[in-house]
Image (cartoon, rainbow, N blue to C red):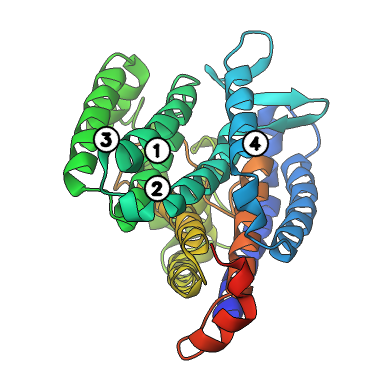
Amino acid sequence: KTVSLLTGAVLILLTLGIIMLYSGSALAGTAGHDDPLFFFKRQLIWLFLSLAGGYLASRINYRAWRKMAVPIALVTFVLLALTIIPGIGTSVKGSSRWLRFGPINLQPSEFAKISTIILMSWWMARIQRRAREFVRGMLIPSAFLGMVLLLIFIEPDFGTTMLIALVGASMMFVVGVRISYLVIAAALGLTGFFFAVMHSDERWRRIIAFLNPDKYEATEAWQLLNAKYAFVLGGGLGVGLGQSVQKRAYLPEAHTDFIFAIMGEELGLGISLLVLVLFIVIFICGLRVSFCAPESFGKLLGFGITMMITVQAFLNIGVVTGCLPTKGLPLPFISFGGSSLLVSVGMIGILLNIAKHSIEPGQEDEKLLRNRKDWA
């Protein structure tokens, strides 16, 4: 039942995403592409690749990722470092987040999400009984997490930095790292983050505009206010698929970070609430899969994946609805972006494989005897 609900929720979100990309294809003409279906066709290719990758991930025993944790992390470090080297990384709107391989642009920070979860799960599962120690429980995982965050932060990508930091801290918390250590680390991190934002004029103006949007309606608060207008125009039933006014001239990035606003405008409040419910379903199913995993690595891996997908979703929705300051985070399974789609579906595939090996209440003894050689 859990697997069916999880799979169904993801497939519905993927369907909504490709429908909205088709609906929003008129935006291609304003993005330097002559083909009005450019974004739709590109996303459709990535969708097929992602479904194939997700299926493959669901067939690979999740314990295999434990053996590959360190190599995957090293490759991630290299890719993240390459993005910030002039002449190698591809810069768009002042941020160097992509690597170009022929016609394909890959975003290493997306792959850093899953590699961080795998490495944190591997390490914390090894030292779980010593998680309250400062060096093993706090210093070593924080050092790895800090290196990843620093490389993403200087791209710059503040939204992904915050997301990975939140998920990493939550994984350390559930293992049993002392709360005092986490509070001190969070205070230091937020202080550094705050000063970095203060020294970035663009991002500081976003904060000010978020606090006083009416004053900056023609500049920094333009996206925020037009996203709100999209929901107002949509009302309960929406203006109709493909009939959005906001996406045509008023809402930049309508096919990526702000696609949820266009969905609300065209399809109405009911579909917007459905998306929220589907992510809640993924959250509940993911936590159940994590709880029923047969050993610590699987529990942590399932928990990290669940948090990464759902926290990102709610951060995106919070930004689009004006509950949070504007930051660049796609809506999983729905926003345009090949790397994001590939990683998100791949993570669901891993979660499904964990569910395949799960231990339901009352089956502990039988499963333990059958799989005792696989336990950590």
Q: Earlier in the sequence, mark 1 or mark 4?
A: 4
x, y percent for residue 174: 32, 57
Instruction: Give the answer, above or below, for where 125 lies relative to 27.
Output: below
Verify CB contact (< 8 Å) between mark 4 and mark 2.
no
The residue pinned by badge 3 equals: 210
Instruction: Give the answer, above or below, for where 239 lies relative to 85.
Output: below
Is residue 72 rendered to the left or right of residue 125? right
Labels 2, 1: front one: 1
SS label for mark 1 = helix
SS label for mark 3 = helix
Instruction: Give the answer, above or below, for where 222 lies relative to 269.
Output: above
Q: The residue under label 1 is which amino acid type?
A: Pro
The residue pinned by badge 1 equals: 141
Badge 2 crowding class, 10 Å Cα cut-off, few under 14, some 14 to 19, many 20 or more, is many
Label 3 vs label 2: CA separation?
24 Å
| Residue located at (62% from left, 59% from top) | 63
Residue 71 shows which numbered tag?
4
Verify CB contact (< 8 Å) between mark 2 and mark 1.
no
Residue 372: quarter of image: bottom right
| Residue located at (67% from left, 59% from top) | 19
